[in-house]
Amino acid sequence: MNNELVHLRMFRALILVGPIATLAVSPVSNFDPINLIKILFISTFSFFCFGILISTFNYSFNKLSNFFWLACAAFTLSLISTLVFSGAPRAQQFWGSFGRNTGFLAYFSLLIILVASAVIQNRVFYTSLIKSLVFTSIPIAIYCLIQMAGLDPVRWSAYDTFATLGNVNFLSAFLGMAALAAITISLDKKLSKTLRMALLILSLVSLVIIISTNSIQGPLIFAAGLGISVLLYLRSSEKLRMLTIPFSLLGVTGFALSLAGLFNKGPLASVIFQPSVIYRADYMHAGWKMTVDHPFFGVGLDSFGDWYRQSRGLLSTVRTGPDRTANTAHNIFLDISSNGGLPLIISYLCLLTFAFFGAIKYLRSNKQFDPYFVAIFSVWCAYQIQACVSINQVGVGVWGWLFTGALIGYRKTSPISSASNAIKLKTKRKKTTNVLPASVGLSVGVTTICGIILAFIPLNADRIYMSASNARDLNRMMSASKLLGATPWHLSQVIQSAMTNNYLAQATEINNLLLKDYPRDFYGWKVKYYISTSTPAEKTNALAELHQLDPFNPDVPKS
């Protein structure tokens, strides 16, 4: 079996997973039209790659260092140990909370994507990967312009410029990375002047859209990434190398002023500071406290929301009212550490460190300006900056994991020209038949089906619930909320509907189910305390739980 030819199938899957995961939405059939469908495609493509990695294990294993595989094993074992020992609800940990879906399945799938990207070690793949990010920004930008013109054909629950990413901050971050990649690639002198100009125009359009959203994430990470690209360009030029030090000092000054601006200080405060920064600080503080209080297994994958009220402290509780809550730390590193404890975040940081030092080694050994590597590296750095202030939204996050693997694998590629590499790849494609070898085909078939089924379960549960809700059929809603893959959000919606229509028996039944499966659900205990069907003993117990879950909440009755 020619393992390299088999890996070409993985090549194609990885080139598709980023664009599809970013663009996919299901607004007609699902209450969560953004994350569930994206996870379905990420899981499907990643498990396809998983089958290839398994069937070519020895070949793949030898292409990377033992340290890398140790970090991957540690990350996987940490995910599993958290799933088993954290005490959080298993279904929530596996599929994630409603509207986030960054549970075990998401992180394991992203890890597979990282590994597969690192293993391929083909320069054509890595150049194609960064190009796919740029190409994906074209339909995103077009859709944004349609939304800005008020012509969006989709009836979203909120009208704003967010394309297929569900939030202006996620859109801003994605377009910031894509614009950065396009500008960096435009420095490739081998491209035609027309194409280079088109890349610059695309970048300009993306930046205009970013500015219209009033989100600071895109401009900040774009500026930081562009600074890295320019610095590496100056470094590679004999004529401009003398500007490296002053430009570096300018960059450090800009970074310091931007950081001060985030805290409403310095000359950039009026441009950068937003009130949401204070709220994010509250969420991050709670995430760190969860990490410290649960250092080994965390509070459970995607279970931040279950512990936020208890961990936020008095100041965060009263700052804007006790009902301002969050189900994420708004910092990917703190999300990982609070969800999975120190073993999970340490193993994740090891993977990032491995990628960073791999990039540094490549830059030291290659003095010439490689626009595609620089684009990957600068976008990767921009993503890590965004990760410090944002959520792991899978439509954006998939690119961060792809590029982490790309940085690891790029250093292993041979320094032959892209043209020669492309010819070599086309030759291999001609030799590749449509049918994989039997052993590989079986492995890939089994793993891909598993990936589809696992991700389809919550997607289907949400679809069935939406259908029942649209029909306003309480019995169907109750049945749908009990399906595997349904979340506390679905159960709480049934409870609200039942109570609104005075079906207290049904509300009590579903609320008991909610508290049985999700004993840290604040809403469930609140309903238990206030609903008339509860006994005095149940009300007393519910009140004690409310005080434990939200100890500084002034709205919780004293007795």
Image (cartoon, rainbow, N blue to C red):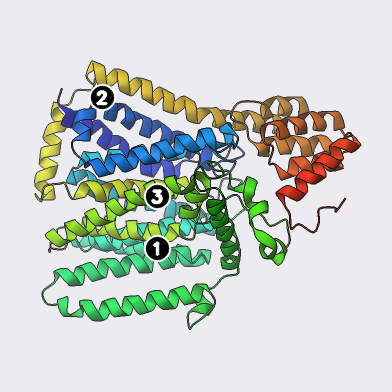
Q: Quadrant of residue 325?
A: bottom right
Left or right of 251 on screen, residue 145: right
Whole-number angstrom distance, CA of label 3 to CA of label 1: 39 Å
Task: Check disc 3 and report the residue beneath it.
Answer: 346
Amino acid found under the numbered disc labelled 1: Val
Q: CA distance from mark 2 to mark 1?
A: 44 Å
Q: Residue at x 55, y 32 (%)?
A: 459
Residue 333, above or below 343 = below
How far apart are the two marked residues, 3 and 2, measured between alpha carbons? 29 Å
Q: Are there few (<14), some (14-19), or many (20+) residues within 10 Å of tag 3?
A: some
The residue indicated by pointer 2 is 55
Label 3, secondary structure: give it. Answer: helix
Q: Residue furthest bottom?
A: 267
Q: What is the x, y in percent for residue 289?
A: 57, 56
Per the image, the residue denoted by label 1 is: 205
Which of pointers 2 and 1 lies earlier in the amino acid sequence? Answer: 2
